[in-house]
Image (tube, rainbow, N blue to C red):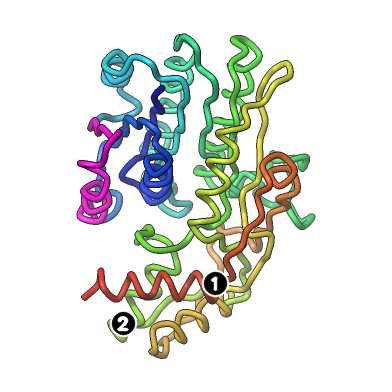
Amino acid sequence: MTILLTGVAGFVGYHVTQALLARGEEVVGVDNLNTYYDVRLKEARLARLEGQSGFRFVRADISDRAAMQAVVDSAPGIDRVVHLAAQAGVRYSIEAPFEYASSNLIGHLVILELCRHLKGLKHLVYASSSSVYGANSALPFSEADRVDTPQSLYAATKRADELMSYAYGHLYAFPQTGLRFFTVYGPWGRPDMAYFSFARAIMASEAITVYDEGRLKRDFTYIDDIVAGVIGALDHPPGGAPPVRLLNIGNNQSETVSHLIETLESALGRQAKIRYAARPAADVVETFADVTAIGDLTGFSPKTKLAVGIAKFAEWFLIWNR
């Protein structure tokens, strides 16, 4: 049978697709290759997938109902959907709010409508975000926590996706799992993420902007651990009524941005030039994932320490950036 995977040219989508193909799955990958960040990176990821046995790419926008219906019609036998496409970025949601409404709200609704009509659908796994925890102060973040204080429009759209999914699970009873990702990093990563932009500035001898003197803390999660969690969740669809659930997927360790910078400096062999600034209103102070639920369900246990993951990223980055 076939997996429909959206956001296939994105960071997480590319790596998840590689892993699915490696275990013999058939994957129809969808992406619109938008210009939010360097399209050459998306094209390079895609080029590594195209030509592999079991893979087919369709360029389409998830918010385009007709285009997405055509994708499904062209691929009979879709029994699982991994929905990773979204407009990412906390700060960019302040600059371009309607991009988030189109991709994250309308796009998610289009996927839900497609799924409720798919015969024999076993599971929809979709990307949510740790950003939904907003101003929560109790740590680590648990799936049982209230999430009604978003600090950005991006976070609000991701929480809206969770609520829409719950409603569709209640109405149409198809299995869904929302994954709340915590600060994913690694090779082939997103240039808008702090670790990537810091690396680029360090190598160019440019100053990096560090908020709140580097005291902000994030649960940095290496891409291989994320992939293991996504596929583990995909293989364990929920039951119950409604058959929906939310799972954290993180490293279960919160570390300061200052420590991230020191780790990057060591991996790149260069010293960072730092310019401090006040914390933007959209940025939360700390993220920290309780991963008990996904661990109990799938055996998920993050294995990659920050120093190891950053070293692997730096090795790739120095080749990509030359």
Asked whether residue 8 is drawn in magenta, I would say no
Q: Check disc 1 and report the residue beneath it.
A: 278
The picture places residue 317, in percent across and down from the top left corner, at 32, 71
The answer to whether residue 17 is above or below residue 278 is above
Percent x, y of residue 135: 69, 52
Mark 1 lies on a secondary structure that is: loop
Can you give x and y, in whole percent of width and height, for residue 229 in the image?
A: 58, 46
Lower sequence index among marks 1 and 2: 2
Front position in the image: 95 or 310:
310
Question: Residue at left 59%, top 26%?
Answer: 176
Q: Quadrant of the N terminus?
A: top left
Q: Left or right of 248: which side holds 199?
A: left
Q: Nearer the viewer, mark 1 or mark 2?
A: 2
Question: Which sits in the foreground, 95 or 240?
Answer: 240
**From mark 1 to mark 2, how far is it between C-alphas?**
24 Å
Residue 196 vertical position relative to residue 56 in the rendered view, above or below: below
Q: Amino acid at mark 1?
A: Ala
* Total numbered labels: 2
Residue 88 position within the rendered picture, expressed as x and y whole percent measured from the top left = 42, 47
Q: Is residue 293 left or right of residue 160?
A: right
What residue is rendered at 31% in x and 82% in y?
203
Tell me where the magenta segment starts and ends, as one range: 38-59
Image quadrant assignment for residue 3: top left
Q: Residue at x 67, y 66 (%)?
A: 254
Give the amino acid type for the residue marked by disc 2 in the picture. Answer: Met
Q: Which residue is mark 2?
A: 203
Q: Is residue 261 above or below residue 60?
A: below
**Looking at the image, which is closer to me, 54 or 179?**
54
